[in-house]
Amino acid sequence: MIELIITALWLVIPAYVPNSTAVLFQGKTPIDFNKDFIDGNRLLGDGKTIRGFIGGGLCGTITGGIQIYLAPTLGLPDFNTNIFLVASLAFGALLGDMFFSFLKRRLNKKRGSPFPGVDQLDFLIGALLVTWLLYPSWFTTNFTPQVLLVVFVLTPVIHISVNLIAYKLGYKNEPW
């Protein structure tokens, strides 16, 4: 069981890092360039910036590159020594976050308002979907049903814990 948990978490580290690090880049230019959708609401909002997207995605990709290097020594999956594969996890996480942000705007939810379940899993869904689309053989070999179950159970717990810590340290305006 412990080996399964370690493998599952190892596989999603490149997806976990981008959301945590994107906020550190504090970009000024929103990805949606302040444009509204046909419903009159912003496409995404001020929280999704070009600098955050690039910076967070690169941090996740670099982290995955380090994992590729360490994997043989640790006996963990090596992502086929493919930096583009880890980039699909990293940038897919940010795309998932942006897609669900777009949905939140359509539901008239304001930036920072809670959306239980979605807030904890949006980035994971994006990372898994993009990686499955680009690398289906690798994905189905590594993301077995057991690994997916572990990832979907542990991610909300980790997400809520990390966000609460970031909130307490003053890095986030809300604890979710």
Image: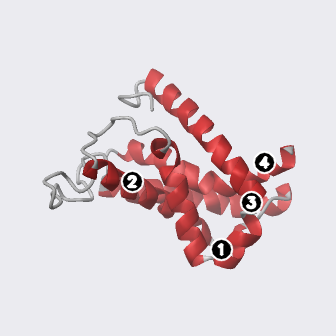
Q: Which residue is mark 2?
A: 100
In-front residue for pair 60/113: 113
* Residue most extreme to the front: 107
> Residue, x 39% and y 35% (percent of image)?
114
User: Do the residues under discs 2 and 3 have CB atoms within 8 angstroms?
Assistant: no
Q: Amino acid at mark 2?
A: Phe
Q: Which colour assignment does the render follow?
A: secondary structure
In-front residue for pair 131/13: 131
Q: Earlier in the sequence, mark 1 or mark 4?
A: 4
Q: How many marks?
A: 4
Mark 4 or 3, closer to the camera = 3
Q: Which residue is mark 4?
A: 6
Q: Earlier in the sequence, mark 3 or mark 1?
A: 1
Q: Earlier in the sequence, mark 2 or mark 3?
A: 2
Q: Which residue is mark 3?
A: 145
Where residue 32 sits: x, y (%)? 23, 59
